[in-house]
């Protein structure tokens, strides 16, 4: 039974996590478990991000202690994790909730039906075995960000009696949407542009140094001629070298400027936080 398998978790929790508050009843902490949102026709990454956003939003509230399924899995052995996989039935959730000692459960689902998105979230009283509130909202299908916009209002509607902790604001931060639709370019593209710009600058400097050397060589040649007739071929060669090195220097410097400008634009579309690899990294 899952209850037996989770017994070790209950026994190994720290006193701070398992001991109820000694404050008056009015300040009693409500322990809430948030289960993974189901995804029907929705990218599982979006569902995971919404789930973690709900956990983060609940942790903004006073007198609420929240545990997520990721945290539960982190404390369980492999065999128990296998049994928890796909656990969505009410009896299964109830067993887990009892073992964790939680008083409330939050479950939810994301679905896409006929091009329209549906956000659903439910608060369940574990002890009374009844639903305390339901949020269901139909949304215009977009890119997944619309689900995040529902998190703050849904938590407020389902937990109206719990105020915000000092310094907290309701709702998912706008930058979290980047985790659903991250900038398209990996960081190596930006750094490649920087390297190219650097190489062009270095080439331009080298060509400039050669140009100065060619000019000095021509001056020395003219000085040593002593008024004697100049060798036309030598004079033409030195002037050609001066022209070529000058042209190369300006071309390379111009290329460096263009590459630098392009790299600056690339920076605006670079996934600096690596959201594309893991949209939930550093969320909480």
Image: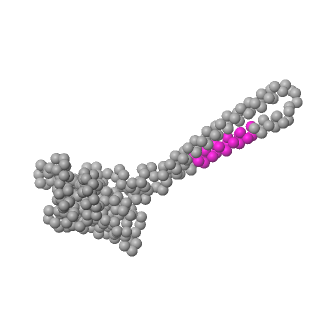
Q: Looking at the image, is 217 positioned above or below residue 187? A: above
Residue 180 horizontal/vertical position (percent): 40, 59
Image quadrant holding the N terminus, namely: bottom left
Residue 191 horizontal/vertical position (percent): 52, 46
- Residue at coordinates 84% horizontally, 25% vertically from top-left? 226
Spot the residue most to the front: 79
- The quadrant in which residue 230 appears is top right
- Residue at coordinates 42% horizontally, 54% vertically from top-left? 277
| Residue 211 falls left or right of residue 277 | right
Is residue 250 magenta-colored?
yes
Question: Which residue is more in the foreground, 22 or 82?
Answer: 82
Q: How many marks?
A: 0
Residue 156 appears in view: no
Q: Which residues are magenta?
A: 242-260
- Classified by dominant secondary structure, the portion drawn in magenta counts as helix
Q: Looking at the image, is 251 positioned above or below residue 133? A: above
């Amino acid at each position: 039974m899952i209850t037996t398998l989770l017994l070790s978790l209950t026994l190994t929790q720290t006193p701070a996590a398992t001991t109820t508050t000694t404050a008056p009843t009015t300040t009693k902490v409500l322990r809430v478990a948030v289960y993974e949102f189901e995804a029907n026709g929705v990218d599982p990454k979006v569902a995971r991000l919404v789930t973690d956003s709900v956990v983060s939003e609940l942790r903004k509230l006073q007198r609420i202690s929240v545990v997520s399924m990721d945290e539960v899995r982190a404390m369980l052995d492999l065999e128990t994790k296998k049994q928890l996989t796909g656990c969505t039935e009410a009896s299964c959730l109830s067993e887990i909730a009892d073992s964790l000692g939680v008083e409330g459960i939050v479950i939810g689902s994301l679905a896409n039906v006929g091009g329209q998105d549906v956000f659903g979230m439910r608060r369940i009283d574990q002890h009374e075995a009844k639903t305390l509130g339901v949020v269901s909202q139909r949304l215009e299908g977009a890119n997944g960000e619309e689900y995040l916009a529902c998190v703050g209002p849904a938590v407020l509607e389902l937990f109206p009696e719990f105020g915000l902790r000092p310094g907290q604001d309701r709702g998912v931060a706008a930058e979290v949407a980047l985790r659903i639709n991250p900038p398209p370019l990996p960081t190596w593209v930006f750094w490649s542009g920087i390297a190219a710009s650097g190489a062009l600058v270095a080439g331009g400097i080298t060509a400039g140094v050669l140009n100065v050397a060619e000019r000095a060589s021509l001056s020395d040649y003219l000085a040593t001629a002593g008024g004697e007739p100049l060798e036309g071929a030598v004079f033409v060669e030195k002037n050609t070298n001066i022209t070529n090195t000058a042209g190369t220097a300006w071309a390379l410097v111009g290329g460096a400027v263009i590459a630098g400008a392009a790299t600056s634009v690339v920076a605006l579309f670079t996934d600096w936080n690596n959201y594309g690899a893991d949209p939930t990294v550093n969320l909480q």
